[in-house]
């Protein structure tokens, strides 16, 4: 889940993430929740969603598999990262990326950030791919009963943001639907589906995912259209990132699409975010649509800067941001 603001920050040499040490994450979640609740309308503590970016451990999370040395050299198994996040760290959701396997005859969906090319895959990469498929992750999630504990999986579809769905994107969606559909015979299926959320910067990809899942009776999953930034001109997006600029057309999609259930954005990278997202949900209410759950990616600035930004934007809570359902954290090593 890479916001365009982070891409710009990379090009300018700015600090792009403020990870919270693992041994401080539980206390930090409480601190962030209290600070957010002071300026926003938040879900109650027992339903507030604390999401770990890249499965709650970006250092061990699989980023690039191609080449003689994957990055990291030995990516951690997703089951291990899930257990760490939901256990020791106390997170209630994890975010991860999915891509189709490029290997002939392999219909798997792999948990990895960057594209996978069929050539130059080391034995380490191939071993990781065989063990870390979406189907296996879903099975582990269900076997451990995490869905009954209120935990969630936020699955980012890594597809281009353009209006045309290419063959690779359709293949990924078909394979993801098959993985989710494999759980339909489970006795807890009605509790499992709401615990699965698909996210993308591409509304058409989400719509195709929704249609495919509903065709196999896998309804009740969540769908988040993610927002990037409105602070930079269009040419920045054209030159430096494949992601779409957050503009009035994206706002319109968020406002008018009835089946969307939420969005993710970083307050640091969206000017007038309180005005914009309150307007979106107010206009959805006028249309008889359920409000979007807002998830704030807060790891692109320090805690003090986040609190100051939220306080300034809401006039100290006098003009609160509504429908905040959760926060997204970057978790680092121990302090």
Image (spheres, rainbow, N blue to C red):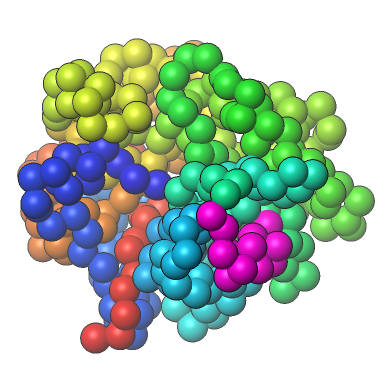
Residue 119, horizontal then vertical, whole percent: 57, 49
Which image quadrant: the C terminus?
A: bottom left
Q: Is residue 268 above or below residue 334?
A: above
10 to the left or right of 56: left
Examine the image and state in which quarter residue 4 appears: top left
Q: Is residue 85 above or below residue 9?
A: below
Asked if residue 132 is among those painted magenta in the image, a careful observer would answer yes
119 to the left or right of 52: right
Q: Nearer the viewer, residue 44 or 220?
A: 220
Q: Is residue 124 above or below residue 184?
A: below
Q: Is residue 296 above or below residue 145?
A: above
Identify the magenta region. 120-133
Q: Nearer the viewer, residue 6 or 285?
A: 6
Asked if residue 255 is among those painted magenta in the image, a careful observer would answer no
> Which residue does the image show at 83% across and 57% down from the upper left?
188
Q: Nearer the viewer, residue 54 or 147?
A: 54
Q: Please say whether residue 141 is visible from this viewpoint.
A: no
90 to the left or right of 242: right
Residue 266, horizontal then vertical, whole percent: 27, 44
Number of numbered callouts drawn: 0
> Which residue does the image show at 22% across and 59% down from the upper left?
17
Residue 155, horizontal then vertical, whole percent: 55, 48
> Which residue does the image show at 68% across and 32% down from the upper left?
171
> Which residue does the image show at 27% across and 72% down from the upper left?
20
Q: Please say whether residue 178 is visible from this viewpoint.
A: yes
| Magenta stretch: dominant secondary structure | helix
Residue 199, horizontal then vertical, whole percent: 51, 39
């Amino acid at each position: 889940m890479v916001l365009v603001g982070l891409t710009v920050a990379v090009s300018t040499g700015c600090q792009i993430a403020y990870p919270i040490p693992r041994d401080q994450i539980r206390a930090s979640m409480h601190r962030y929740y209290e600070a957010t609740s002071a300026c926003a309308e938040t879900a109650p503590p027992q339903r507030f969603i604390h999401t770990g970016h890249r499965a709650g451990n970006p250092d061990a999370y699989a980023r690039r598999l191609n080449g003689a040395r994957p990055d990291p050299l030995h990516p951690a198994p997703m089951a291990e990262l899930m257990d760490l996040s939901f256990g020791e760290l106390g997170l209630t959701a994890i975010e991860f990326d999915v891509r189709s396997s490029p290997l002939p005859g392999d219909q798997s969906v792999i948990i990895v950030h960057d594209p996978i090319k069929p050539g130059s895959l080391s034995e380490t990469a191939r071993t990781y791919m065989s063990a870390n498929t979406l189907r296996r992750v879903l099975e582990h999630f269900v076997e451990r009963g995490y869905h009954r504990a209120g935990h969630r999986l936020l699955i980012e579809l890594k597809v281009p943001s353009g209006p045309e769905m290419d063959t690779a994107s359709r293949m990924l969606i078909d394979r993801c639907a098959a993985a989710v559909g494999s759980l339909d015979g489970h006795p807890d299926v009605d509790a499992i589906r709401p615990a699965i959320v698909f996210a993308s910067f591409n509304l058409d990809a989400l719509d195709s995912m929704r249609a495919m899942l509903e065709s196999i009776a896998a309804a009740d999953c969540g769908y988040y259209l993610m927002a990037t930034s409105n602070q930079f001109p269009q040419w920045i997006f054209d030159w430096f990132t494949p992601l779409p600029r957050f503009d009035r057309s994206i706002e319109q999609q968020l406002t008018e699409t009835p089946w969307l259930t939420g969005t993710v954005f970083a307050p640091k990278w969206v000017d007038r975010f309180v005005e914009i997202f309150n307007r979106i949900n107010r206009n959805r209410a006028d249309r008889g649509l359920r409000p979007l759950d807002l998830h704030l990616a807060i790891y692109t600035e320090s805690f003090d800067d986040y609190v100051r930004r939220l306080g300034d934007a809401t006039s100290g809570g006098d003009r609160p941001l509504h429908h905040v359902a959760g926060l997204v954290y970057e978790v680092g090593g121990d302090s």
